[in-house]
Image (spheres, rainbow, N blue to C red):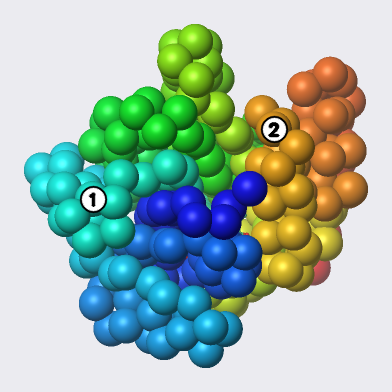
């Protein structure tokens, strides 16, 4: 399915984007990686060469529409028109609502929502021509509210809305859309999270233990191959999302209980 395909991955220099890229080159795809930091891109390219693949790298900021629109013609010239766009670029800012500035909210929305929107705008004419695919990496945090993730969940809920609606518009044009909703997994994004996160966030989020990144890659690729629209990697995560979508009151009750326990413990100490 991926053999001979041109695949563009935003956020491809790190974490899930890079791990997916490594798996796809092994399956015969040509990958173009987009991220801002050139050194990280060079290191990612070297990692991909180690598994016998070739990566084309582009330093660009997905939150800047001019920058990202200017990047796609370069990709097309070097590897050809993309068949698949994987939007993995994202940032996380955790903290109590009253400690997060409005600028932080804007930064998160600009990256996690407009970054995906901008990339789709730039890639869509090519994806339509190739009757290709768009894969948006959202989060469980796009399906349910999470303590400490007011900025992050806002951006991911918006991304879920964009993805659900866009699916209807591009399906008649032969374009498949996938919405990936992982829970927490090992990556540079979460590496130091435990040093700074609020205890309430930890208690609620780690109801689902942190996943290994390889399991995320495996389930994401399997979901794309099966043509699934919503892909939730990991069994426990799937059960949580099922609960959040079909029994939201119970989900809120369980979360309230976990958060209340942290609150009570803090006040007893
Ligand atoms: N890790 C988790 O537990 C988890 C759970 C659920 C969902 N997710 C989602 O999965 C996706 C990947 O997360 P990850 O853990 O792999 O993160 P990561 O390791 O921190 O990688 C993020 C990538 O995005 C790039 N990026 C960030 N801002 C960018 C911008 N403005 N323009 C272009 N590239 C940008 C980064 O490179 P530069 O900084 O060099 O630009 C990097 O390549 C994200 O969308 C995240 O929200 C993660």
Q: Is residue 50 above or below residue 151?
A: below
Q: Residue at x 23, y 50 (%)?
A: 76
- Residue 135 in the image, given as x and y percentages of width and height: 52, 40
Neighbourhood count class around disc 1 (C-alpha, 10 Å): few under 14, some 14–19, many 20 upward: some
Point out the tag, 1 or 2, that comes first from the N-terminus. Answer: 1
Q: Is residue 152 visible?
A: no
Q: Residue at x 86, y 29 (%)?
A: 243
SS class, disc 1:
helix
SS class, disc 2:
loop
Toward the viewer: 245 or 170? 170
Q: Which disc, if any, is residue 227?
A: 2
- Residue 27 in the image, given as x and y percentages of width and height: 62, 64
Q: Is residue 84 visible?
A: yes
Q: Which disc, if any, is residue 76?
A: 1
Quarter of the image with the C terminus in it: bottom right
Q: Which disc, if any, is residue 107?
A: none
Neighbourhood count class around disc 2 (C-alpha, 10 Å): few under 14, some 14–19, many 20 upward: some
Q: Quadrant of residue 140?
A: top right
Toward the viewer: 167 or 186? 167
């Amino acid at each position: 399915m991926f053999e001979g395909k041109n695949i563009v991955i935003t956020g491809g220099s790190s974490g899930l984007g890079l791990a997916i890229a490594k798996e796809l080159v092994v399956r015969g795809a040509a990958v173009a990686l987009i991220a801002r930091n050139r050194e990280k891109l060079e290191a990612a390219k070297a990692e991909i060469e180690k598994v016998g693949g070739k990566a084309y790298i582009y330093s660009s900021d997905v939150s800047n529409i001019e920058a990202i629109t200017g990047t796609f013609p370069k990709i097309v010239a070097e590897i050809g028109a993309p068949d698949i766009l994987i939007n993995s670029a994202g940032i996380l800012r955790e903290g109590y609502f009253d400690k997060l500035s409005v600028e932080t909210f804007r930064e998160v929305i600009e990256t996690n929502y407009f970054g995906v929107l901008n990339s789709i705008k730039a890639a869509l004419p090519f994806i339509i021509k190739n009757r290709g695919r768009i894969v948006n990496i959202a989060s469980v945090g796009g399906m349910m509210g999470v303590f400490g993730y007011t900025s992050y969940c806002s951006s991911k809920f918006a991304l879920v809305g964009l993805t659900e609606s866009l699916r209807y518009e591009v399906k008649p044009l032969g374009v498949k859309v996938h919405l990936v909703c992982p829970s927490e997994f090992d990556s540079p994004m979460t590496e130091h999270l435990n040093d700074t996160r609020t205890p309430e966030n930890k208690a609620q989020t780690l109801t689902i233990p942190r996943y290994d990144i390889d399991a995320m890659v495996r389930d994401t690729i399997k979901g794309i191959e099966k043509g699934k629209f919503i892909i939730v990697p990991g069994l426990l995560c799937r059960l949580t999302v099922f609960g959040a979508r079909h029994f939201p009151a119970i989900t809120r009750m369980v979360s309230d209980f976990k958060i209340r326990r942290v609150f009570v413990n803090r006040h007893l100490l």
